[in-house]
Amino acid sequence: MTNRSQNGRSTTLRQLPSIDSLLQTETAKALAAKLGAESLTKLARKVTDGLRREILTGSSPLADSQNGTRASFLHEAERRMAQTFESNLRRGVQRVINATGVVLHTNLGRAPLSDEARRALIEAAGYCSLEYDIGEGVRGRRGARAEELLIELTGADASLIVNNCAAAALLVLTTFAEGGETIVSRGELVEIGGDFRVPDVMAHSGTRMIEVGTTNRTSLSDYREAISQRTRMLMRVHTSNYRIVGFTRTPTRRELAELAHASDLLLYEDAGSGALVDFSAYGIEGEPVIREIINSGVDLVTFSGDKLVGGPQAGLIVGRSELIEQMRKHPLYRALRADKLRLAALEATLETSLRDADVPVREMIGLDEQRLRARAEALIRRLAKGTSADLWALVPGESAVGGGSAPTSALPTVLIAINHPSLSATQVSAMLREQHPPVIVRIIDNQAAIDLRTVSATDEPDLEKALLAIGS
Ligand SMILES: *Cc1c(COP(=O)(O)O)cnc(C)c1O
């Protein structure tokens, strides 16, 4: 570094606003009410530190003598304070419009809750009868009603609820197979989105994983030959997010149950998405119905509350009573048990399913192309009043179930593709994310595309406003 540039930089550094002067600005005063004094000071320090670093590394756009006035630095610092505050706000959990057509979008919170479940959440937010028997005025059992509903919906003897399906699998494996061996097919050693890996969960629960068969074929004798004195359990895993097709083989649940029980072992199935009803009527293949799994003799089944069940994130365990009671007493259950908000929303979701009414997930999966086309056409007609009509085009496409369910089932849909005259698809989708609430779209064939399958009727007015904003 030459002396001259060093001198230039120290001159420029003297133009940096002090924390105190920055805190006296109108911007800081406006932010003070929202942030509190301490956080505001931290923010001011962060901004001035950033500016100082840029001057020292020569990367500041204000560092040359014409631009680097005291006023311009102060102005830039104010702008950055406001911007950092805004972007921090936007990093929190907020409502978005899911226009991607991916029903169980893991990044967007998986299942949207029903109105009943939302009301139940609010009601449970204050004091509630979480562990209180109102009839008797004594302590009650947490989750009792949700457990009853699960029993009715699946035909199992008993049930237990924890925070998510990964926790449920951990609890089952730890309670019944810790210190022993668990046999699983090589074709089922899957990784599900969000870092759930079957071998890792086994390792953490302290059971030794015994792999049998091959990726595409595992026979009953493979399991039989692997059984030893140390075996505790046979485990089946639903290969949720992928399918092996072609030359494949796997024993039936009934065969596995007979084998397990003849050797005094348990058969456990991690069903993942956990359908309470048969989704094949909706064109979705390969998602096992929990009631059928129980009927075929499986001792314990785990599945997620926020996939095809359509409720809040939860780990649902159903199976034989004495096994469920053993888990309820395990110290790990205390660490994994569900809280009141989750239980309230789950209860409401299960009540809806018991009436055989549609929760939003089922409703969205059940929407046919014709209905979607009619809604898309109506939306375009409304948009054409405020924007150029050739901005919007209807094109056929496919929605997805998502959330690691039914990877081979595509749901036919009608997309609204956006033909923007000057913005790229990436720019259009960025602009839509800047709306309030942000709208999330997919980019298909170089166009931002809206799939109304995942946009509820209550979201539609906000979607319309966002689309008008980018079209005008
Ligand atoms: C999704 C899934 C899980 C993980 O469920 P979370 O509720 O996200 O913890 C575990 N096992 C299978 C088979 C799954 O499909």
Image (cartoon, rainbow, N blue to C red):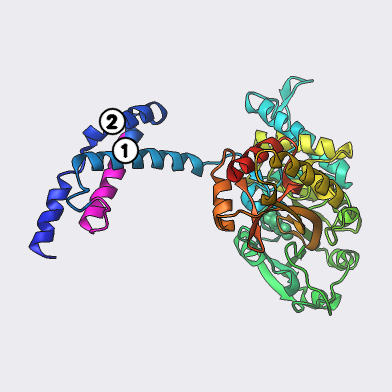
User: Which residue shows up at 85% across the image and 46% down it?
Assistant: 371
The disc at residue 384 is none
Q: Quadrant of ligand 1?
A: bottom right
Question: In which quadrant will I find the N terminus?
Answer: bottom left
Tag 2 and tag 1, C-beta contact below 8 Å: yes
Q: Where residue 378 sits in the image (x, y, percent)? A: 78, 41
Which residue type carries mark 2? Thr
> Does residue 159 show up?
no
Report crowding for label 1: few under 14, some 14 to 19, many 20 or more residues within 10 A (C-alpha). many
Image point (63%, 48%), residue name: 108
Q: Nearer the viewer, residue 118 or 409?
A: 409
Task: Identify the image quadrant of residue 340.
Answer: top right
Q: Which contiguous range is marked in magenta?
A: 41-62
Q: Is residue 423 left or right of residue 196?
A: left
Q: Position of residue 10 (x, y in %)?
A: 13, 51
Horizontal placement of 141 versus 335: left or right?
right
203 or 47: nearer the eye?
Answer: 47
Which residue matches tag 1? 78
Q: Position of residue 112 (x, y in %)?
A: 71, 42
Kindly state the secondary structure of the residue where label 1 is placed.
Answer: helix
Circle 2 residue: 25
